[in-house]
Amino acid sequence: MHEMGVVLNIVRTAQEAAKANHVAKIGRLTLQVGELTGVIPKYVHACWPAAIEHTILEGANLVIEEIEGIATCKDCGCDYSVLENMNADQPVCPTCGSKQWKVKTGREVMIKDIGVIDD
């Protein structure tokens, strides 16, 4: 399970942002996770309590927004869901049948916002 490494990196990044902005306590963190990353949200939630223990995020609520994997067809320009249009090991454009595509969304793992607790 690589989610613990991902979560520890997110906690480190949030702590650095808090320190740079003179924040003493974080109460909520919203994370965006693309469905093409291989990061599984339920495992991120499972790792969260251990990763934030004894940090300024201890007790913070984790909100995960899942981002759909969207591809753009290089031939016709159609945007479509990667996972809904898989054929064998690759997506196929539902409009023209092309196998030429590029990922538009779905590879993100990023902090969307950090909720600060004011004392």
Image (cartoon, rainbow, N blue to C red):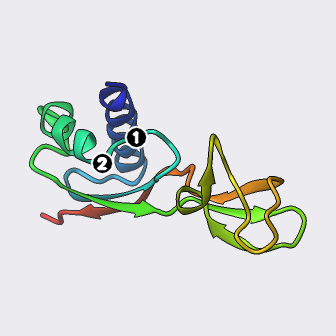
On the image, the x and y values in percent for residue 112 come to 43, 62
Res 28 quadrant in image: bottom left
On the image, the x and y values in percent for residue 78 come to 77, 74
On residue 29, the disc is none
At 39% across and 33% down in the image, what residue appears?
A: 6
At 30% across and 28% down in the image, what residue appears?
A: 4
Relative vertical location of residue 115 with respect to residue 10 in this rendering, above or below? below
The answer to which of 22 and 53 lies nearer the viewer is 53
| Residue type pointed to by label 2 | Pro
In the picture, the quarter occupied by the C terminus is: bottom left
The answer to which of 78 and 4 lies nearer the viewer is 78
Whether residue 67 sits left or right of residue 47 in the image: it is right
The answer to which of 51 and 88 lies nearer the viewer is 88
Residue placed under numbered mark 2 in the picture: 41
| Residue type pointed to by label 1 | Val
At 65% across and 69% down in the image, what residue appears?
A: 80
Mark 1 surroundings: few (<14), some (14-19) or many (≥20) residues within 10 A = some
Do tag 2 and tag 1 residues touch (Cβ < 8 Å)? yes
Mark 2 surroundings: few (<14), some (14-19) or many (≥20) residues within 10 A = some
On residue 39, the disc is 1
On the image, the x and y values in percent for residue 47 come to 20, 35
On the image, the x and y values in percent for residue 96 come to 82, 70
Whether residue 103 sits left or right of residue 99 in the image: it is left
At 40% across and 54% down in the image, what residue appears?
A: 21
Looking at the rendered structure, the secondary structure element under dot 2 is helix
Whether residue 11 sits left or right of residue 26 in the image: it is right
Res 27 quadrant in image: bottom left
In the picture, the quarter occupied by the N terminus is: top left
